Every structure is written in C-alpha cells, then in structure tokens.
Amino acid sequence: MSEWSFVIAAYGLTWFVLSTYAVYLMRRRTLAERTLTRETREDGWQG
Amino acid sequence: MAGLTEGRPRLPRWVIPFGLFALGFFILAQAIGLLNSPPEIGMGNLQKIMYVHVPAAWNAMIAFALVLFWSLLYLWKRQEKHDLLAASAAEVGTVLTGLALALGMIWAKPTWGVWWTWDPRLTFTATMFMIYVGYLALRAFTEDDERRRRWSAAVGILGAINVPIVYMSVRWWRTLHQPQSTPSTVDADYVLGLRMNAFAFLFLLIFFVAVRYHAARVEREAEVRLEERALADGAVHV
C-alpha cells in the first residue's frame, strides 16, 4: 500500500466516525423528544 | 394538566448554528492539513495523519478533564445536570479515544511495521479507553439512579488519574512513540494545520457534548413523566 492509501484511510475513518456519531446523536435527540412529547400528551389526557 | 412545553428541556439556540460553524471549520482545517503542508523528511505524506490523530487524542483528554470537573461538581452539589454533563463528555471522549487509537494504528503500520505494540503510550491510551467504556457500561447497567450517579462520579474521578499518565508517558518512559506533537515541537510548516485541526476537533467536541447533554435531559424528563404516570395509574387501580 502506498503512503497516500494510509492517509486516505485515516481521513476516511475520521469522517466516517465523526459523521456517524453526529447522526447517532441527532437521532437520539429526535427519538428522546418524540418520547417526551408522547409522555406529555398522555399526561395531558389523564389530567 | 401538564402543558406540552411545561418544563420541557430545549436545545439552546446557539447549538445548531455552532454545529454548522464547527463543520465548516472542520472542512477548512482538513483541507489545510491535507493540501497545505509539505511531505515530512522521514515520514513523507504519512505526516498528514498527525492532523487527525493528535487533535482526536488531545480533545479526548479535554473531554475526560471535563468528566473529572463535572463528577467533582456532582459529588459536591448533588445536582443531576452535572452527572448528565459528565456522562455526555465521557461518551464523546470515548469516541475520540477510539478514533485516536485507530488512527494511531493506521499510522503505525507503515511507520513501525506493526499495527500495534505494547508501548507505554499505546498501553495507557488503551487503558484509558477501557476505563471510560467501563464508565459507560456502569451507567447502562446500574438501575438505581442515585447509585449510578455516585458510582460513575467516582469512576470519572479515579479514571482521570490515568489521563496525565497518558500525556506524560512519552517523557517518563523510553517509548517507541515519538514525544508529544505540539505547535512548539513540530516544524513551522505544520503548525497551522495542527492548530486549525485542534480547534476544529474542539468545536466538534463542544457541539457533541451540547447535543448529547440535551438528549440526556430530554430522556430523563420523559422517564420522570413515565414514572409519574405509572404512580398515578397505580394510585387509581389500588
């Protein structure tokens, strides 16, 4: 393997890890907000 | 009747614009690192891996310093937000440590001829990674809230002892790993790329911790509502 293939692998891995983590965080946030909205609505119906 | 927005945690307004700024800065820093530095005499173009490996490692250590700070604050003030902030920083720091280790391996193979060796710097970094994986596992598997917060604060404080050992390991022991790469130890041609990428990773760290903390607050709020509803249901049925 040439030097550049290691460099590209390193930068590719960096982008993959950071963008995957960013997507995971945004999805987790969305899911949490949806759950909270549902719980709050159900609270409201009971009240 | 509880309103939809009553007590609901909101993502601070600055977070998304700041995330976009961090992304733009990161793209610029990466371009400078890749395109604006000459090949190093000994390593050639492999030197460019420094712009991602070193900032990832530095910012992982910053994240773990934040875990220490918020863990101490939690034990002092016993406020849940400090526990959630510590957990958020620990998760981001663990991701960055894993990335730094993997990038180090990619650099080591063509430079040292092996993917991994039990060099003190590598060994203590791997230990640091395992400590914070343990911290996250502890949080995931401890059901009692108070116990989870206290135990994870203790691990967050004790685990931080390893962080300066990781940083100083290249000075304290004779190691295969080269001394710390900082703007004062690298050639002038590489300072800009290193500084830019260090700040780019720092901005991403701030963004990630902010989003992770917000998600944790919302999850916690939903849990509280669920518990309250379960108690109310119980009260009705008894």
Image (spheres, coloured by chain):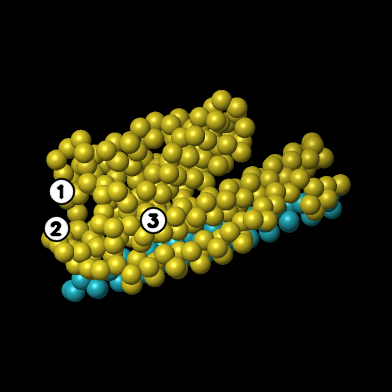
Chain colours: A cyan, B yellow
For badge 1, the amino acid type reads Leu
In percent of width and height, residue B62 lies at 43, 44
Q: Which mark is residue B176?
A: 1
Nearer the observer, B16 or B227: B16
Residue annotated with mark 3: B195
Residue at image point 35% right, 66% down = B33
Mark 3 or mark 2: which is in front? 3
SS at mark 2? helix
Mark 1–mark 2 Cα distance, whole angstroms, equals 9 Å
Disc on the earlier residue, 3 or 2: 2
Outermost residue on the front side: it is B188
| Mark 1 touches mark 2? (CB < 8 Å) | yes
Residue annotated with mark 2: B112
Mark 3 or mark 1: which is in front? 3
| Mark 3 touches mark 1? (CB < 8 Å) | no
Nearer the observer, B8 or B38: B38
Disc on the earlier residue, 1 or 2: 2
Q: Is residue B24 visible?
A: yes
Q: Assess disc 2: are there few (<14), some (14-19) or many (≥20) residues with their C-alpha within 10 Å of its C-alpha.
A: few
Residue at image point 20% right, 71% down = A3
Nearer the observer, B184 or B223: B184
SS at mark 1? loop
For badge 3, the amino acid type reads Arg
Whether discs 1 and 2 lie on one chain: the answer is yes
Apparent side of residue A1 relative to residue B238 in the rendered image (left or right): left
- The image shows a total of numbered marks equal to 3
